């Protein structure tokens, strides 16, 4: 049969239609290593973020806290996905949330902390190495709970948007360009606003704001006029007791949708964007008991946003795989220590996948700690647990190297994690004991914490 241009065109159209109608095949969710806990020495850790604070291209960890004489903990990444001991800061009161941005145009990330118990917000200036000093505090509303630091008026300087849960409003503070801020301008929200997300919702290339309201069971959307002033809020119904909001493109249509956690009915509300900053009615998904926080990212590298919730009364996190069309699969639960309060993600170990950090707030043995779950989508094959001298074998020379490092300040294991034979993210006395038992008396394999004859980290 002679094939002419009409046949070719028809074939192309048929193939295109078949591709469009084919079901979206999402990748399976990845495995995560058993969690590694880092103490912050606070009585609680309320929120955690992952950002590069010392300009070394590795994600560091900042955690806010409620009491014990501290407000903030900074843990600097060693460069291998483990963290140094925390540095502690006090800003005057309980801190519920954190935002990071270059506020003073010196090319490092500063921090903003709303002081829940003091009705002001504190700006901390970074010295470029991940150490901070208090620069200034600014009065806002009553009980500030959530903060965003982004350029609201298009002058390239990050401004501040803060929600205040007992004055039922949102405070906007414009940056003077040097990391100091103008007087507060307030906008009414719903009742008891708890968090805030800053993102372009109507496609006009400026930052709009979304605020969930705990007592009015809705989310308030503030569209930016382009100059850092906002139109009156439009409220969209969610679930019962809306606590946290996260925004990203869930249905791959190039606009940002909303996910809101509802702590009373143990679910999240998904509101899909119509493309102009208005939203479809919410679709709700059950997760775990009392989901206090939501984080979203592509955890399984299939091109779609997946969602993670921290479920305070289920002692775990739920991961909902995104289908790419704005719908989500049933949640998969990963166990954590009791009472997880917040969750955040990033490539902590620079292996090309998204790891998770979970903070714990209330009294138990892990309170005041942060739990790290390493994504195993792209495991690092170069590390052999216990091979501290990187010669591809685990033997007496590795035991000697670890012992010298721990007890005499000798050379560090290479890579550092190879010396962590008990999966606690540090090479220390317990690892020296473990490797001695393994080499000399036939103890458990390095990293075989749970006795399954396979590495557990």
Image (spheres, rainbow, N blue to C red):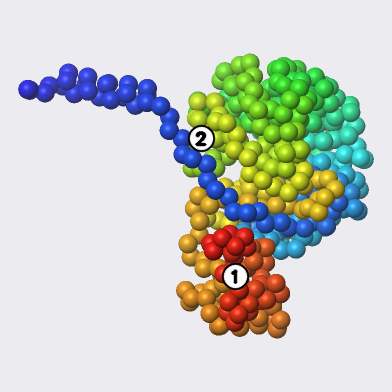
Callout 1: helix, strand or loop? loop
In this rendering, does residue 204 appear at all? no
Q: Is residue 93 above or below residue 382?
A: above
Residue 306 location (% of width, % of height): 57, 36
Task: For label 1, count other residues whose C-alpha is less than 10 Å away and answer few (under 14), some (14-19) or many (20+).
Answer: some
Q: Nearer the viewer, residue 285 or 220?
A: 285
Q: Quadrant of residue 225?
A: top right
Residue ID at (88%, 39%): 116
Q: Position of residue 164 (x, y in %)?
A: 85, 31
Q: Earlier in the sequence, mark 1 or mark 2?
A: 2
- Residue 375 shows in this picture: yes
Q: Position of residue 105 (x, y in %)?
A: 70, 48
Left or right position of 71 against 153: right
Asked if 291 appears above or below 337 in the picture, the reply is above
SS under mark 2 = loop
**Disc 1 to disc 2, how far (Cα)?**
40 Å
Q: Nearer the viewer, residue 326 or 240?
A: 240
Q: Quadrant of the C terminus?
A: bottom right
Instruction: Kindly identify which residue carries mark 2.
Output: 304
Rendered image: mark on residue 444:
1
Rendered residue at 67%/63% (across/down)? 424
Q: Where is residue 150 drawn, in percent x and y?
A: 69, 37
Residue depicted at x 88% and y 31%: 141
In this rendering, which labeled residue sits more in front, label 1 or label 2? Answer: 1
Farthest-out residue, left? 1
Q: Is residue 379 left or right of residue 224?
A: left
Residue 293 in which image quadrant: top right
130, 431: nearer the viewer: 431
**Label 2 packing within 10 angstroms: few (<14), some (14-19), many (20+):** many
């Amino acid at each position: 049969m002679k094939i002419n241009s009409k046949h070719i065109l028809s074939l192309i159209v048929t193939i295109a239609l078949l591709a469009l109608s084919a079901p979206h095949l999402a990748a399976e969710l990845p495995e995560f290593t058993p969690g590694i806990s880092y103490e912050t020495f606070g009585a609680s850790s309320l929120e955690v973020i992952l950002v590069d604070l010392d300009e070394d291209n590795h994600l560091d960890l900042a955690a806010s806290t409620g009491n014990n004489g501290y407000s903030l903990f900074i843990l600097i990444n060693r460069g291998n996905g483990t963290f140094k001991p925390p540095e502690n800061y006090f800003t005057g009161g309980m801190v519920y949330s954190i935002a990071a941005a270059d506020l003073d145009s010196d090319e490092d990330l500063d921090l903003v902390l709303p002081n829940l118990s003091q009705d002001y917000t504190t700006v901390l200036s970074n010295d470029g190495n991940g150490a901070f000093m208090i620069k200034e505090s600014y009065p806002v509303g009553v009980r500030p709970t959530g903060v965003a630091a982004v350029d609201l008026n298009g002058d390239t300087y990050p401004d501040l948007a803060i929600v205040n849960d007992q004055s039922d409003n949102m405070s906007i503070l414009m940056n003077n360009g040097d990391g100091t801020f103008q007087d507060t301008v307030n906008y009414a929200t719903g009742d008891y606003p708890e968090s805030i997300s800053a993102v372009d919702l109507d496609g006009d290339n400026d930052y709009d704001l979304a605020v969930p309201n705990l007592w009015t069971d809705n989310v308030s959307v503030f569209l930016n006029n382009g100059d850092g002033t906002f139109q009156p809020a439009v409220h969209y119904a969610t679930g019962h007791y809306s606590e946290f909001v996260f925004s990203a493109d869930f249905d791959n249509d190039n606009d940002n949708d909303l996910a809101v956690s509802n702590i009373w009915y143990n679910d999240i509300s998904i509101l899909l964007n119509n493309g102009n900053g208005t939203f479809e009615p919410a679709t709700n998904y059950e997760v775990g008991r009392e989901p206090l926080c939501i984080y979203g990212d592509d955890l399984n590298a299939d091109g779609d946003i997946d969602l993670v919730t921290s479920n305070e009364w289920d002692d775990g996190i739920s991961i909902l795989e995104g289908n790419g069309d704005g719908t989500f699969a049933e949640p998969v639960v990963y166990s954590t220590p009791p009472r997880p309060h917040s969750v955040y993600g990033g490539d902590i170990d620079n292996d090309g996948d998204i790891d998770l950090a979970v903070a714990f707030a209330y009294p138990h043995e892990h309170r005041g700690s942060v739990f790290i779950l390493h994504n195993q989508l792209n495991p690092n094959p170069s590390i052999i647990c216990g091979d501290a001298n990187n010669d591809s074998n685990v033997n007496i020379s590795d035991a000697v190297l670890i012992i010298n490092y721990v007890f005499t300040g000798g050379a560090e294991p290479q890579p550092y994690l190879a010396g962590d034979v008990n999966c606690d993210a540090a090479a220390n006395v317990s690892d020296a004991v473990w490797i001695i038992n393994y080499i000399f008396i036939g103890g458990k394999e390095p990293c075989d914490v749970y006795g399954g004859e396979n590495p557990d980290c």
